[in-house]
Image (cartoon, coloured by chain):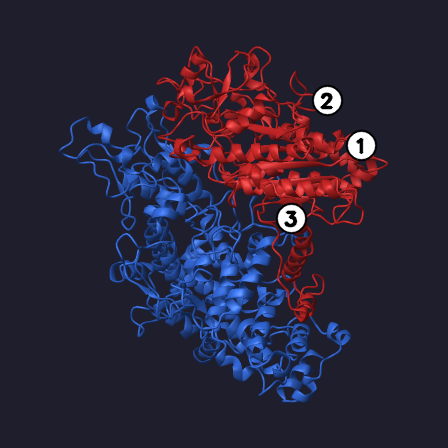
Chain colours: A blue, B red
């Protein structure tokens, strides 16, 4: 029944399709997508075999498929596509930030960093050199997934006020190491000033009991709980190990305390200890931060021209002072070097390496990180077998500089990613930010309007937004995606309320999914208010704006707007006519051909009514807007399958 | 051999339900209601319970501080427990001179808490001392043994972890992955007693564990009101509704999303009408999408509920019991604590807390509704009694405020059991440094029990979250023609571990502050 209806349309029997189907008959149509048939004779990596295959893959591996992307992937296949992506030049936020501040003379803020992120996420021409095309979609998508595990956020007061450049520098660490080695990534993240500020390792110092000073435990806790091993012991397939029916903790409080003592002695490189002791006063929030683009350094050697005892200038707890923790017991597991005990007498650098190795070599890391990457890219409820296949690749490449490249490839080419198992439970709810990037990529969004404002002392900051189609700025669009949960889509890069990201990996949505034990992390962000705000923001801003709209004379910054015109040919005939071509094209572009017969007919019943006589001269724009709105708010689109 | 208390409780509840596990017991409250009582709650009055959650773990040990000179010196002096966080004594706001702990010390509030000082001294605010997550009463030796995996007592999992402790405060189950919050469980109990179409469980800022009921879904709104999906064109309504059935979708995630969309729409209209029913902005000057704005909106919603509860045709007809959740962040003061807390010259988060709670009380009092609402603070944990460089680390027990016309204010409350039992009565568990040995406060968790000053200053709670919450639940559930004691025991399973004492009577108002 479903297939035959498709054949009717494909055979051009548009006359039948133009007749509105009675509601009762519509209701009888299937709510499930047509199954994607594969003969299974060729291996997965020889695909994609259909446009749907290609579009599904691109939804997992990019910021949203476009018609061009689908065609290209069909022609080159997964293997070549992946190879091209692994070789593509990385897009660095610091390049954009340095151009904005150095060349344009603008003041760098969170808006600058957000523009830089959208440049990487949307791809396309570079604003400072339009001939340079950004194509590193997979790398950027993986970096975004990593940013939701290794969280820093501008909701931290200091980072929000002073840390925009530092956060761009931090994001570039994720970009540069997205296909690299996780141990290397952990170390670079640990020593980044943005993370040092966010989780208090910056300026953390050894205990001084006489002053009741103790090392802060924030980073020691979160690097274990969130960035590496989690709270409970895992099997290689990501399920929890049980003892007597109960999960087993990965560490105790004393473990965290010991990590806190190890992670001491690091501070801004620019702390000046040659004059007088500035380690303690060096980190002064909200005032004069150090250089956010240089890794933290260890303060453990008394400068030659300092008076005073050498012992007073060593801020790293290496077990040799009376107030230190001696022979720190870190994580214990089978095969842990020295039984997880960090011996006294090391340097800050070597002690840090020991601690990071101790974490990295814990058997939890493979499944803990692999499962979350699967959840961010493919599906919320991967089978344990899927998790184990990917974790095996993670572990097999522990020493490799291309570990995560192998992991990402394993995730995307796994049968469970390429084929839908159980249509009833497969998939993931799209994040609002990823739905936005999909819309903008697939609808040719560019920045429009805006003016050039040169710097005038005591009057204004410089900002150059005139004729800048590739600077993705705008109060109502690019800049307003985050902030508090009262505006826009309540999500922006590196903008989560807490170090626990916008949602926790183990979130169970109330109701049917909770009862069935189905994880739905992204649902945690979809509160009643955010659902409404997101829908209204898509409606009023993202969909309704057009890149050729007349500009407002007072609009200094401009906005990011989509381009409706290329879809006019799809939208219908001269003054009306059936909307089939539009619906089918959008099914292809946005929904991987998985739009159910029910949804398709529901859209047609509504869109067919848009014509010149009922809507006037811009009826095609209205029809396109209606189609986009109904699709982007629909459960079938919002659940990426 | 000491019996395992958790197993004992499990078996008791299992017996009541004919064999179901304790976790499914929480999901079968209606079954228990039916099984144990002839009728459900039937309220004739209206009450609102307001949880004010302070994310990050408030340093209540710089919020409520000793004022008596010798105690002040022991606290903030150069040999004290937190010299780097000293507040000038002249700036502190003294609380009415009521003996509190067994050592007769007078206490004061942080200089920014002028509103709370007024409320306390006029009897409309109480302080519950040293409240924290506990499964069973725990003393110093027991806690230390348990933390080193040497048995002893059962401890809540993942102490000192923000997310886990915030979740435990809000859900208080013996599990790491809370399925319900106690705000939700209380709402479940009263769901059938409420008429109307207004939400009975509402958050003014985000979703969290507190808001999760089994039958009742928490409603999330903003400070300016509910957000409504704009389907302004008449013809957009039809396809939108068709695409959001919530039951016909072929995929569970799709059904869940569709249901979430419908939930948003159906209640938004009701909410916005209620918010517009009254304007309390005069009691919240400077409110700006913050805690003050949240509490102003709650006050206006409470006004609407009371103005309409006897109007059977309105959405609030028959509405009797509502639970609200408001919150503020920024309390995780690892560094720069004095600045973050603020002072009267440069107000910070404590000023916001005080004027928000005072504004809330005064607004409702102005329309004769002071007694219908009880607001209480909660937080991930208290913080270390000792300071790090210029802040504090994650702690365990902490003090909390309870505000409202029904509160028996102007006093301290708390179980005062466990380690503090060697202090003279009345003892509420306010922990002060020993005047003989200022660096070893009672109850401090120390890695070396014989080494003064070597601990981190995490105070073991002397009152459990369950006891605190049960006191609030008892007030909330009273007046419904049903003795709520057995229901309270069901929704706080660990409560049975805590025996009655001079300051805690489960047969007479629990801790007794409301």
The residue indicated by pointer 2 is B508
Classify mark 1: residues with Cα within 10 Å, few (<14), some (14-19) or many (20+): some
Residue where numbered disc 3 is placed: B276
Tell me how far mark 1 sits from mark 3, CA to CA.
34 Å
Looking at the rendered structure, the secondary structure element under dot 2 is loop
Residue B482, numbered label: 1
Whether residue A246 sits left or right of residue B485 in the image: it is left
The secondary structure type at the circle numbered 3 is loop
Residue lying at 62% horizontally and 62% vertically, measured from the top left? B230
Question: Are the residues tagged 1 and 3 within 8 Å (C-beta)?
Answer: no
Give me the C-alpha separation between circle 1 and circle 2: 15 Å
User: Upstream in the sequence, badge 2 or badge 3?
Assistant: 3
Residue A159 place in picture, x, y as percent: 37, 47
| Parent chain of label 1 | B
Q: Residue furthest right?
A: B38
B279 or B457: nearer the viewer: B279
Q: Chain of mark 2?
A: B
Which SS class for mark 1?
loop
Q: Residue A247: in sight, yes or no?
A: no
Task: Using residue A221 as the reference point, say whether residue A100 is left or right of it.
Answer: left
> What subunit carries mark 3?
B
Quote the CA–CA distance across marks 2 and 3: 39 Å
Give residue A191's position: percent from left, percent from top: 32, 46
């Amino acid at each position: 029944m479903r297939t035959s209806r498709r054949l009717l349309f494909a055979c051009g029997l548009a006359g039948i399709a133009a007749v509105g189907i009675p509601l009762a008959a519509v209701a009888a149509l299937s709510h499930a997508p047509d199954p994607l048939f594969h003969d299974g004779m060729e291996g997965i990596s020889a695909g994609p075999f259909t446009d749907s295959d290609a579009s599904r893959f691109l939804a997992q591996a990019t910021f949203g498929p476009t018609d061009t992307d689908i065609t290209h992937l069909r022609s080159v296949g997964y293997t070549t596509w992946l190879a091209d992506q692994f070789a593509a030049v990385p897009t660095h936020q610091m390049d954009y930030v340095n151009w904005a501040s150095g060349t344009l003379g603008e003041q760098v803020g969170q808006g600058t960093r957000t523009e830089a992120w959208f440049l990487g996420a949307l791809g396309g021409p570079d604003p400072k050199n339009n001939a340079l095309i950004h194509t590193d979609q997979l790398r950027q998508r993986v970096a975004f997934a990593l940013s939701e595990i290794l969280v820093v956020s501008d909701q931290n007061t200091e980072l929000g006020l002073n840390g925009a450049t530092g956060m761009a520098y931090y994001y570039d660490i994720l970009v540069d190491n997205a296909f690299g080695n996780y141990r290397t990534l952990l170390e670079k993240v640990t020593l980044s000033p943005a993370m040092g500020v966010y989780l208090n390792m910056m300026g953390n110092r050894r205990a001084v009991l006489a002053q009741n000073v103790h090392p802060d435990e924030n980073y020691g806790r979160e690097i274990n709980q969130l960035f590496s091993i989690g709270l409970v012991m895992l099997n290689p397939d990501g399920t929890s190990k049980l003892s007597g029916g109960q999960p087993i903790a990965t560490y105790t409080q004393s473990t965290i305390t010991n990590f806190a003592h190890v992670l001491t002695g690091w501070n801004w490189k620019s702390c000046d200890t040659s004059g007088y002791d500035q380690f303690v006063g060096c980190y002064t929030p909200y005032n004069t931060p150090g250089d956010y683009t240089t890794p933290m350094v260890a303060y453990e050697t008394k400068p030659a021209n300092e008076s005073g005892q050498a012992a007073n200038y060593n801020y790293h707890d290496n077990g040799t002072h009376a107030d230190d923790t001696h022979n720190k017991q870190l994580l214990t597991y089978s095969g842990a070097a020295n039984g997880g005990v960090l011996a006294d007498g090391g340097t800050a650098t070597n002690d840090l390496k020991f601690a990071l190795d101790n974490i990295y070599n814990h058997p939890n890391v493979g499944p803990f990180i692999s499962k979350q990457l699967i959840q961010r890219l493919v599906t919320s409820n991967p089978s344990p077998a899927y998790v184990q296949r990917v974790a095996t690749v993670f572990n097999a490449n522990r020493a490799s500089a291309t570990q995560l490249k192998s992991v990402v490839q394993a995730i995307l080419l796994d049968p469970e990613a390429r084929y839908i198992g159980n249509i009833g439970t497969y998939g993931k709810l799209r994040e609002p930010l990823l739905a936005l990037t999909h819309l903008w990529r697939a609808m040719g969004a560019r920045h429009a309007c805006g003016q050039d404002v040169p710097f005038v002392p005591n009057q204004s900051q410089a900002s150059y937004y005139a004729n800048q189609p590739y600077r993705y700025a705008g109060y109502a669009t690019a800049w307003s995606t985050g902030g508090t949960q009262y505006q826009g889509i309540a999500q922006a890069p590196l903008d989560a309320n807490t170090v626990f990201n916008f949602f926790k990996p183990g979130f169970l949505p109330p109701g049917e999914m909770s009862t069935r034990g189905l994880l739905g992390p992204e649902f945690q962000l979809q509160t009643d208010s955010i659902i409404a705000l997101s829908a209204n923001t898509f409606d009023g801003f993202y969909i309704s704006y057009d890149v050729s709209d007349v500009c407002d004379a007072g609009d200094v910054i401009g906005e990011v707007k989509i381009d409706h015109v290329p879809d006019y040919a799809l939208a219908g005939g001269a003054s009306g006519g059936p909307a089939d071509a539009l619906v089918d094209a959008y099914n292809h572009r946005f929904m991987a051909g998985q739009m159910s017969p029910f949804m398709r007919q529901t859209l047609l019943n509504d869109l067919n009514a848009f014509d010149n006589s009922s809507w006037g001269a811009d009826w095609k724009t209205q029809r396109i807007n209606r189609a986009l709105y109904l699709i982007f708010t629909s459960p079938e689109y919002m659940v990426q399958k | 051999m000491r019996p395992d208390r958790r197993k004992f409780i499990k078996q008791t509840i299992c017996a009541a339900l004919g064999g179901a596990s304790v976790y499914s017991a929480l999901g079968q409250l209606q079954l228990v209601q039916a099984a144990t009582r002839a009728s459900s709650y039937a309220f004739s009055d209206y009450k609102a319970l307001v949880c004010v959650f302070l994310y990050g773990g408030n340093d209540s040990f710089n919020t409520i501080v000793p004022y008596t000179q010798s105690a002040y010196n022991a606290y903030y002096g150069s040999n004290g427990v937190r010299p780097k966080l000293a507040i000038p004594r002249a700036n502190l706001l003294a609380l009415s001179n009521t003996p509190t702990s067994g050592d007769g010390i007078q206490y004061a509030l942080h200089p920014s808490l002028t509103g709370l000082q007024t409320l306390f001294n006029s009897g409309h605010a109480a302080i519950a001392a040293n409240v924290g997550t506990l499964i069973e009463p725990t003393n110093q030796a027991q806690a230390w043994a348990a933390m080193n995996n040497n048995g002893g007592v059962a401890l809540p999992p993942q102490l000192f972890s923000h997310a886990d402790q915030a979740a435990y405060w809000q859900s208080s189950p013996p599990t790491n992955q809370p399925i319900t919050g106690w705000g939700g469980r209380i709402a479940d109990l009263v769901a059938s007693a409420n008429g109307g179409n207004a939400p009975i469980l509402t958050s003014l800022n985000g979703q969290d564990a507190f808001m999760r009921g089994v039958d009742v879904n928490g409603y999330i709104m903003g400070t300016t009101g509910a957000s409504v999906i704009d389907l302004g064109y008449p013809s957009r309504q039809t396809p939108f509704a068709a695409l959001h059935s919530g039951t016909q979708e072929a995929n569970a995630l799709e059904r869940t999303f569709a249901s979430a969309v419908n939930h948003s729409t159906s209640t938004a209209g009701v909410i916005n009408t209620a918010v517009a029913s009254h304007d309390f902005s005069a009691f919240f000057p400077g409110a700006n999408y913050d805690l003050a704005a949240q509490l102003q909106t709650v006050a206006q919603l409470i006004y609407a509920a009371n103005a309409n509860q006897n109007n059977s045709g309105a959405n609030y007809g028959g509405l009797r019991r509502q639970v609200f959740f408001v919150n503020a962040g920024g309390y995780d003061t690892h560094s720069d604590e004095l600045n973050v807390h603020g002072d009267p010259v440069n107000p910070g988060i404590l000023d916001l807390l005080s004027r928000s709670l005072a504004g809330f009380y005064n607004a409702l009092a102005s329309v004769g509704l002071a007694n219908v609402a009880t607001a209480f603070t909660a937080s991930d944990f208290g913080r270390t009694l000792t300071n790090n460089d210029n802040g504090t680390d994650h702690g365990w027990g902490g003090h909390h405020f309870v505000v409202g016309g029904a509160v028996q204010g102007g006093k301290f409350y708390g179980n005062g059991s466990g380690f503090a039992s060697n202090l003279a009565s009345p003892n509420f568990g306010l922990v002060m440094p020993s005047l003989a040995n200022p660096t070893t406060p009672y109850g401090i968790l120390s890695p070396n029990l014989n080494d003064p000053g070597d601990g981190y200053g995490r105070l073991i709670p002397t009152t459990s979250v369950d006891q605190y919450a049960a006191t609030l639940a008892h007030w909330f559930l009273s007046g419904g023609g049903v003795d709520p004691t057995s229901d309270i025991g069901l929704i706080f399973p660990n409560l049975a571990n805590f025996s009655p004492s001079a300051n805690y009577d489960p047969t007479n108002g629990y801790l007794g502050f409301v």
